[in-house]
Image (cartoon, rainbow, N blue to C red):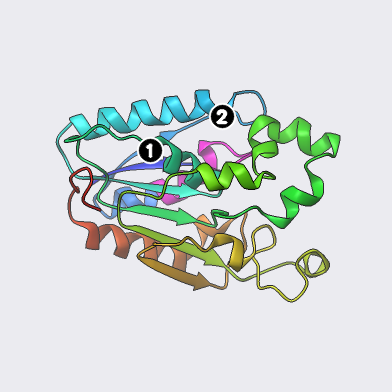
Amino acid sequence: MHVLLIHGLARTPLSLLGLAGDLRRAGHRTESVGYLGALESWQRIVARVRGRLGVAACAGAPYAIVAHSLGGLIARAALGEWPAGRPLPGRLVLLGTPNRVPRLARRFHRWWPYRLLNGECGQLLAEAAFFAALPRPPVPTVVIAGTKSWPRALGLFGDAANDGIVALDEARLDGAAEFIELPVSHTFMMNDRRVRATVRDLLAQAGGTSEAGDP
């Protein structure tokens, strides 16, 4: 299967290099889609990803998306208004993606270091209207969320289980095929053997592509 990998905000494709190697050893072909969240507009990033997905769809082979954090929101936006009849990905796997406004974005989006590092994308994460406008994924979608926080993060999340960046309740996505909790932290969850094994299993189950309008 052709697997498109989309990294998170303030990261690069290098962050998914280990996962890509793991998937290739399992027999998949991987493709990384990069972007610069600090410098590029949200619309430009989404357009690039939509274009890469279109190329994959037209190749005629089964394909899927594995996306970390903001990458999952980019994938959701890129799959919106999908052309009728064009094959959709067989599966969308979200790793630690916030599907509701994250507490940390609400708290820090006005701080200049946050604005400098995260650009327009970081500001959008603090807006409820942005999340409300995101389309529901038109393909079988699985969310993998972490529960391994770091001690100082507890004061930011109260009693809510979290991965140090995203709380479980923020990762939940209405209509998702499955919600999987693993004891991993947000930033490096893609390197955890349990996450990688779960991703491999999910891709093996996907098997092929779906038709547009038939998730």
Q: Which mark is residue 88?
A: none
In the picture, measured across the screen, residue 131 lies left or right of residue 66, that is right
User: Is the residue 191 above or below the residue 124 in the image?
Assistant: below
In the picture, measured across the screen, residue 24 lies left or right of residue 13, that is left
Residue of label 2 = 42
At 69% from the left and 68% from the top, the residue drawn is 149
Which of the 4 quarters of the picture holds residue 142?
Answer: bottom left
Q: Amino acid at mark 1?
A: Gly
Q: Amino acid at mark 2?
A: Trp
Q: Secondary structure at mark 1?
A: loop
Which of the 4 quarters of the picture holds residue 198?
Answer: bottom left
Q: Secondary structure at mark 2?
A: helix
Q: How far across and how far down the image is residue 172, in percent?
A: 52, 64
Q: What is the CA distance from the residue labelled 2 to the residue labelled 1? A: 14 Å
Query: Marks 1 and 2: in contact by CB < 8 Å?
Result: no
Circle 2: is it few (<14), some (14-19), or many (20+) Cα within 10 Å?
some
At 64% from the left and 70% from the top, the residue drawn is 148
Q: How far across and how far down the image is residue 31, in percent?
A: 36, 36
Viewer-nearest of discs 2 and 1: 1
Q: How far across and how far down the image is residue 28, in percent?
A: 26, 48
Circle 1: is it few (<14), some (14-19), or many (20+) Cα within 10 Å?
some
Q: How far across and how far down the image is residue 195, in percent?
A: 45, 64
Q: Which mark is residue 80?
A: 1
Q: Number of callouts in the render?
A: 2
Magenta residue span: 7-20
Q: Quick check: is 28 in the magenta stretch?
A: no
At 67% from the left and 30% from the top, the residue drawn is 120
In the picture, measured across the screen, residue 210 lies left or right of residue 80, that is left
Q: Earlier in the sequence, mark 2 or mark 1?
A: 2
At 37% from the left and 30% from the top, the residue drawn is 50
